[in-house]
Amino acid sequence: MAFLFNSDPVRAAVFRKVFARELPDVELFHSSECVDPEKVRYLLTWTAPDNIGRYRNLEVLFSLGAGVDQFKRESLPRQVKLVRMVEDGIIRMMQEYVVLGVLSLHRDMVAYREHQRCRTWRGLAAPQATERRVGFLGLGMLAQAAIERLLPFRFALAAWSRSSKEIEGVTCFHGADQLAGFLAQTDILVCLLPLTNETRGILDAELFSRLPAGARLLHVGRGPQLDQTALVQALDNGHLAAAMLDVTDPEPLPDDHPLWRHPKVAITPHIASVTQADSAAKSVVDNIRRHRAGEELIGLVDRTLGY
Ligand code: NDP
Ligand code: OXD
């Protein structure tokens, strides 16, 4: 029985060690050339290889990332379970990044960076955190973990998801009907939605117009969720005050893209959170054990919903 690790050699070495200790009967291969395709039961990869059909006995396809939009789900064999990455390293890094982003936007760090460039020494009036309303698009694993870390700052917290939720300290909205109400009371909007047919292009001119004047955007979901032209317009006409983008479309943006040099925009190169080999290997081992025991897999993707 084989596990094919289709990613970088450094992380493969860590997985190999953890597998040897925890699942000695599963052989780990780092190269598809060295493994008999019939033996592959588990495959971990960022995107599905073109020839995935040759792994006729594949049972579980593990995504290297928390997102699974990079897989063409319709071309995956029906019997294969698709599992997104749920592991402590990704969660902790996203907690750090969202706290960093929300505090930066709350305390005008994007504007101060521009002031510094122009050698301007001028303070901007900042409301108390209790008066700043932070709203999350998406209230899944990562948004909930980030919210947990934001609670001590006493922001007014809200979130919007597909299904109804109740979380202490968070005003919860759900479904298309409640989106406008959620946006109307959001000063800092954090996008942590998966990319699906429903969320592609969701951050558009209409959505921005529903945010209060002076609102800020922290985008950590996926690039194609954002209409970048609409964002530039909303920043230029002053409706939005600032944006921090960890994801863009394409990645990276072309050299001459206006977002690169926009004074109200900070960009990071899709580093909000990165799968950590050691904790990811433990989580994959745990899921393989669950699979063998006929238990529900953690992070199993609902192929109909797309996340
Ligand atoms: P989850 O699947 O745990 O949560 C997704 C959330 O989005 C859920 O609350 C879900 O609602 C909500 N949602 C999905 N579709 C809709 C919709 N149409 N309308 C309203 N709400 C919707 O995902 P994670 O929290 O683990 O990850 C979120 C995304 O973050 C990933 O898919 C990935 O794209 C991105 N990401 C980015 C990283 C980066 O470095 N920038 C790193 C890791 C992930 P419900 O709860 O009702 O199902
Ligand atoms: C992920 C990512 O999905 O890095 O894990 O974006």
Image (cartoon, rainbow, N blue to C red):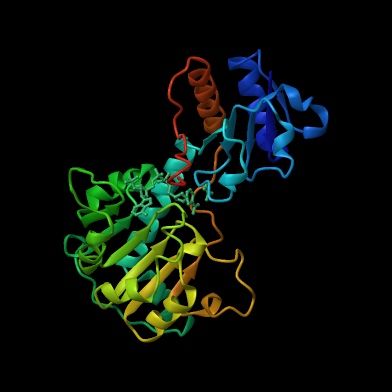
Q: As displayed, is residue 191 above or below residue 14?
A: below
Would residue 155 be seen by someone viewing this image from the given angle?
no
Residue 69 image point, x, y percent:
53, 50
State the quadrant of the C terminus: top left
The mark total stands at: 0
Residue 29 image point, x, y percent:
73, 27
Residue at x 52% of width, y 76% of height: 259
Residue 26 image point, x, y percent:
66, 17
> Is 156 placed left or right of 225 in the picture?
left
Residue at x 49% of width, y 58% of height: 222
Residue at x 30% of width, y 65% of height: 188
Q: As displayed, is residue 61 above or below residue 128?
A: above
Closest to the observer: 107 or 151? Answer: 151
Residue at x 43% of width, y 42% of height: 92
Q: As displayed, is residue 147 above or below residue 113?
A: above
Would residue 19 be seen by someone viewing this image from the given angle?
yes
State the quadrant of the N terminus: top right
Residue 200 image point, x, y percent:
46, 62
Q: Quadrant of residue 48?
A: top right
